[in-house]
C-alpha cells in the first residue's frame, strides 16, 4: 500500500506530465495560428478557440501540479518556493526555472484581457515569451522530474522540445528568406520587379500575419488600423508574397509595375486602304479618327496606405 507521500507524488507527476504535453500542443497550435496554416479550411475563430482552450487547460493543470507539491507531508517544496524562484535548498535550479515558466505563462495568458490596451504589436511581442516559457518548462521536467528515468519518458520530452525548436526556426522570416533565396539561385530564377500593394479594408480582419511576414511593409497599429507601403522594391517581394499566402482573409492583392507601354496611335496615321479618286472623289484619303486615350500613369514613388477595417481613410 502506498504511503501518503507516494500518493501525492504520483498525482503531482501525472498532472504535471499531462500539463506539459497540453502546453506543448498549445505552442504548436500557436505556431499554426502565427503562420496561417490550414486557415483556408479551418475558420480562424475555431483555430483560435482550440488554441486558447488547450493553453488554459494545460496552465490550470500546471497550477494544480504546483499546489499539490504543498500537500506532500514533509515535502521539499515550500510555499515561498511557489512564488520566488531559486530559493529551494534541495533543487534551486529545477524548481526555479519551473516557477519562472509558470509565471511567464500566467503573464501571457492575462495579457489577453488587456490586448487592446497594449496594442497588437506589443501584445504579440509579449506573447512570444511563451516560447521561452516552454523551453524553461522542458528544463524543469528534465532537471526536477524524478520519473524521467525511463527512455520513453525523457525521450518523449526531448522529442517535444526538438520538434518545437525546429518548427520555430524553420518558420522565422529570416529562415524563409534564406530558403527562398537558395531556391532561386539553384533554379536560376531572377528576383521579381517592383510591385504595388493594395489591401481590401472590408476583408481585412487584423490577424497580423502580414506584419509578421513583412514587418517592413505592413504595420498593425495600436488603434487597430493597418498601415502598409503602396509600393515595395524587389528585395522585399518574397516577404510580401509570403504575407499574401498566409493572409486568411485573402485581403492583399499585388500588381507588377509595367515595364513596357504601348503609345496611342498618332492622329494622322493612314488606317484606310487607298480609294479610287474617279469613283469616290469626295472621300478623304486620310483618316480623321480621334486618338485613343493613353495608359494611366503609375506613380514611381513609394507611398503608404492606412485604412480602417470599415474602409474609412
Image: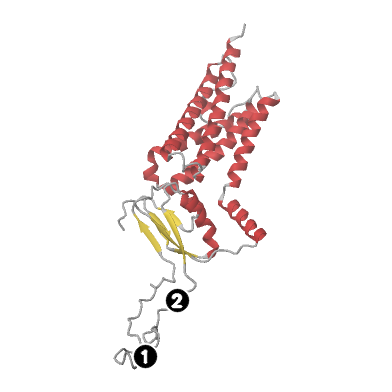
Q: Is residue 130 left or right of residue 110?
A: right
Q: Is residue 306 above or below residue 282?
A: above
Label placed on residue 18: none
Q: Is residue 9 above or below residue 104?
A: above
Q: Is residue 204 left or right of residue 132?
A: left
Q: Secondary structure at mark 1?
A: loop
State the CA–CA distance, disc 2 to disc 1. Answer: 33 Å
Residue name at image x 64 percent, y 38 percent: 162
Label placed on residue 262: 2
Q: Nearer the viewer, residue 11 or 171?
A: 171
Give the quarter of the figure containing the C terminus.
bottom left
Q: First in sequence: mark 2 or mark 1?
A: 2
Q: Residues within 10 Å of mark 1 (few under 14, many from 20)?
A: few
Q: Position of residue 68 (x, y in %)?
A: 53, 19
Q: Residues within 10 Å of mark 2 (few under 14, many from 20)?
A: few
* Disc nearest the viewer among 2 and 1: 1
Q: Position of residue 105 (x, y in %)?
A: 50, 35
Q: Position of residue 15 (x, y in %)?
A: 55, 22
Give the quarter of the figure containing the N terminus.
top right
Residue name at image x 40 percent, y 45 percent: 118
Q: Position of residue 269 (x, y in %)?
A: 40, 86
Write down the residue under mark 1.
276
Q: Is residue 100 above or below residue 148?
A: below
Query: Is residue 4 shown to the viewer in this render?
Result: yes
Amino acid at each position: 500500500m502506498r504511503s501518503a507521500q507516494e500518493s501525492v507524488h504520483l498525482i503531482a507527476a501525472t498532472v504535471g506530465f499531462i500539463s506539459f504535453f497540453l502546453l506543448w500542443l498549445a505552442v504548436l497550435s500557436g505556431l499554426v495560428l502565427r503562420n496561417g496554416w490550414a486557415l483556408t479550411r479551418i475558420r480562424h475563430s475555431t483555430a483560435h478557440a482550440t488554441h486558447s482552450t488547450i493553453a488554459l487547460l494545460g496552465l490550470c493543470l500546471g497550477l494544480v501540479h504546483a499546489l499539490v507539491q504543498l500537500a506532500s507531508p514533509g515535502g521539499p517544496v515550500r510555499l515561498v518556493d511557489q512564488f520566488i524562484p531559486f530559493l529551494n535548498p534541495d533543487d534551486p535550479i529545477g524548481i526555479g526555472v519551473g516557477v519562472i515558466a509558470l509565471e511567464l505563462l500566467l503573464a501571457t495568458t492575462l495579457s489577453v484581457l488587456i490586448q487592446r490596451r497594449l496594442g497588437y504589436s506589443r501584445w504579440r511581442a509579449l506573447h512570444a515569451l511563451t516560447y521561452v516559457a516552454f523551453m524553461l518548462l522542458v528544463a524543469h521536467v528534465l532537471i526536477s522530474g524524478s520519473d524521467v528515468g525511463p527512455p520513453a519518458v525523457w525521450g518523449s520530452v526531448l522529442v517535444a522540445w526538438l520538434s518545437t525548436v525546429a518548427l520555430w526556426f524553420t518558420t522565422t522570416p529570416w529562415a524563409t528568406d534564406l530558403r527562398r533565396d537558395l531556391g532561386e539561385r539553384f533554379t536560376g530564377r531572377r528576383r521579381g520587379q517592383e510591385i504595388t500593394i493594395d489591401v481590401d479594408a472590408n476583408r481585412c480582419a487584423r490577424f497580423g500575419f502580414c506584419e509578421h511576414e513583412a514587418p517592413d511593409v505592413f504595420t498593425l497599429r495600436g488603434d487597430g488600423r493597418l498601415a502598409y507601403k503602396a509600393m515595395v522594391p524587389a528585395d522585399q517581394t518574397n516577404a510580401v508574397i509570403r504575407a499574401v499566402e498566409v493572409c486568411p482573409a485573402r485581403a492583399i492583392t499585388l500588381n507588377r509595375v509595367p515595364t513596357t507601354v504601348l503609345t496611342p496611335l498618332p492622329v494622322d496615321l493612314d488606317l484606310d486602304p487607298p480609294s479610287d479618286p474617279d469613283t469616290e472623289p469626295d472621300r478623304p484619303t486620310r483618316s480623321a479618327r480621334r486618338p485613343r486615350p493613353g495608359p494611366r500613369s503609375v506613380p514611381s514613388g513609394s507611398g503608404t496606405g492606412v485604412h480602417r477595417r470599415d474602409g474609412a481613410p
